[in-house]
Amino acid sequence: MTTMNKHTRTSTANDVGTLAEDARELISATADLTGEKIAAARERLTEAVEAARDRALEAAKTTDKAIRSNPYQSVAIAFGVGAIAGYFLAKRK
């Protein structure tokens, strides 16, 4: 279980990190542009990226705590969701 949780946290962190990196590149690319609207857009983008990163990390921590608190229920729910998804995917073919 812990390996899966670490993988999920790592994957989430990598996705958020990639998004943040892309946003920073966009901010850098527009650094030479002037104007209040551009500056305001860069500031909003920076704030949004930081907030998204914080929310994603908090969600990963909360999920990890919930799974650790209820491991059997977590496995049962994952199994059930997988079975339902498998049923519908098999039915499509």
Image (tube, rainbow, N blue to C red):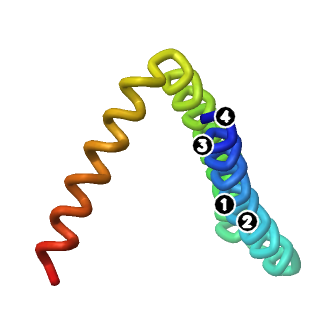
- Determine contact: label 4, label 2, CB under 8 Å: no
Residue 22 coordinates in the image, percent (x, y) = 74, 71
Q: Tag 3 or tag 1, which sits nearer the N-term? A: 1
The amino acid on which the numbered mark 2 sits, given as a three-letter code, is Thr
Which of discs 1 and 4 lies nearer the camera? The answer is: 4
Quadrant location, the N terminus: top right
Q: Is residue 47 visible?
A: no
Q: Tag 4 or tag 1, which sits nearer the N-term? A: 4
Badge 1 marks a residue whose secondary structure is: helix
Q: Is residue 59 above or below residue 91?
A: above
Residue 20 coordinates in the image, percent (x, y) = 74, 60
Badge 4 marks a residue whose secondary structure is: helix
Determine which of the numbered discs, if any, sits on residue 18 in the image: 2
The amino acid on which the numbered mark 3 sits, given as a three-letter code, is Ala
Residue identifier under label 1: 15
Residue identifier under label 3: 56
The amino acid on which the numbered mark 4 sits, given as a three-letter code, is Thr
Crowd class of label 2 (few under 14; some 14 to 19; many from 20; radius 10 Å): few
